[in-house]
Image (spheres, helix red, strand yellow):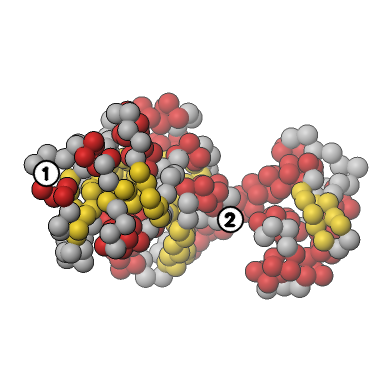
Amino acid sequence: MAIFHKNTDFYNFLFDGGVMKLQQLRYIWEVSRHDLNVSATAQSLYTSQPGISKQIRLLEDELGVEVFSRSGKHFTHITPAGEAILKAAGEVLRKVESIKQVAQEFSNEKKGSLSVATTHTQARYALPDTISSFIDRYPEVSLHMHQGTPIQISEMAADGMVEFAIATEALELFSELVMMPCYRWNRCIVVPKDHPLTELSELTIEDVAKHPLVTYVFGFTGRSKLDEAFTSRGLEPKVVFTATDADVIKTYVRLGLGVGIVARMAYDETLDSDLIALNASHLFASSVTKIGCRRGTFLRGYMYDFIEMFAPHLTRDLVDQAFACQSRQELEELLGALELPVY
């Protein structure tokens, strides 16, 4: 029976006599990512369900342990051994993908794909110019945008499903990623034109707290800074509606549900001319949006360019220095003094 105490044991088995196939590793990895649903996995991989089941059983027989526990023909959960095997398998598959990318870089440096995971606010308001410029420069690069919560974004990047993660909140979730600061941004208070807050000469946090609030879901787009501002003054905000989408928030402000608090970049003077945006930079601490990817990722030339298009201060040389940092403290010392643009 093969017992793997460390990932190195797994690699030694893989390359020193094991006959397992990369296809089998791909199958167990994809099954784990499809909630153990073999049928859904087969559809996503354009293959047959019996074929996947057979290959997984052959792999388990060779390893001498079960990756998945079963109830009849159905997988019920991942075994402890399976957890360790899947972690190592994921690393193998990512290394294989890096090898492919190295080859692609030398065969055609302007052709390939790039996947980015981010929130709605970044995708809707911060990224359009960058994406437009990137597509103009690299028309043969297939660009894929994935939207999600900070947790979903971090998981996609950590699992290698996307190359880049762009986020503001919950950066502690991104421990496996090298996250680099892009820009600093502030908030604004959004209200109808006849709202009482528009008549004040100087807006205070106490003034805002008197009204029902419509803002981002907790864990999204700088929401923690908003909550900290109220708490520090001993105030309890009356949040009556939350959403992940600034456009949805503005819609409900228009309906009179409450005062909206959104990223300043989410207010468009033309499209939102029926609303008034009140400066709130003195009420709430600014937030920093960061871009990053998994340590060890092979960055192709166009990936460096994407980063620099989005954050011009993140040059190729600086990104390489960031990836060479061995700790968060070292990364903070390198990037912490950067002067970031403010929006």
User: Can residue 100 be seen from the camera position used here?
Assistant: yes
Horizontally, is 169 left or right of 72 in the view?
left
Dot 1 alpha-carbon crowd within 10 angstroms: few under 14, some 14 to 19, many 20 or more: few
Residue behind mark 2: 97
Residue denoted by label 1: 200
Q: Is residue 191 left or right of residue 225?
A: left
What residue do we see at 45% from left, 30% from top? 328
Residue 49 lies in quadrant: bottom right
- Please state the horizontal and vertical placement of residue 14, each as a whole percent of the image: 77, 47
Judged from this view, the residue extending furthest toward the left is 201
**Residue at the far right in the pictured view:** 1
Q: For the residues marked 1 and 2, what is the alpha-carbon distance in whole angstroms? A: 57 Å
Is 273 drawn above or below residue 179 in the view shown? below
Amino acid tagged 1: Leu
Give the total number of marks visible in the rendering: 2
Residue 279 placement, left or right of 63: left
At 86% from the left and 57% from the top, the residue drawn is 71
Q: In this orientation, which residue lies closer to the viewer: 332 or 200?
A: 200
Q: Nearer the viewer, residue 118 or 305?
A: 118
To which quarter of the image does residue 138 belong? bottom left
The N terminus - image quarter = top right
| x then y, percent, for residue 166 | 41, 49
Q: Nearer the viewer, residue 74 or 111?
A: 74
From this viewpoint, is residue 58 visible?
no
Which residue is pictured at 55% across the width and 48% down the height?
155
Instruction: Characterize the local packing of mark 2: few (<14), some (14-19) or many (20 or more) Cα atoms within 10 angstroms.
Output: some
Give x and y (percent) for residue 164: 45, 52
Q: Position of residue 301 (x, y in %)?
A: 40, 55
Residue drawn where x is 76% and y is 73% of the image: 48
Q: Is residue 166 left or right of residue 24?
A: left
Q: In what element is the residue under mark 2? A: helix
Vertical relation: 279 (above or below) 322? below
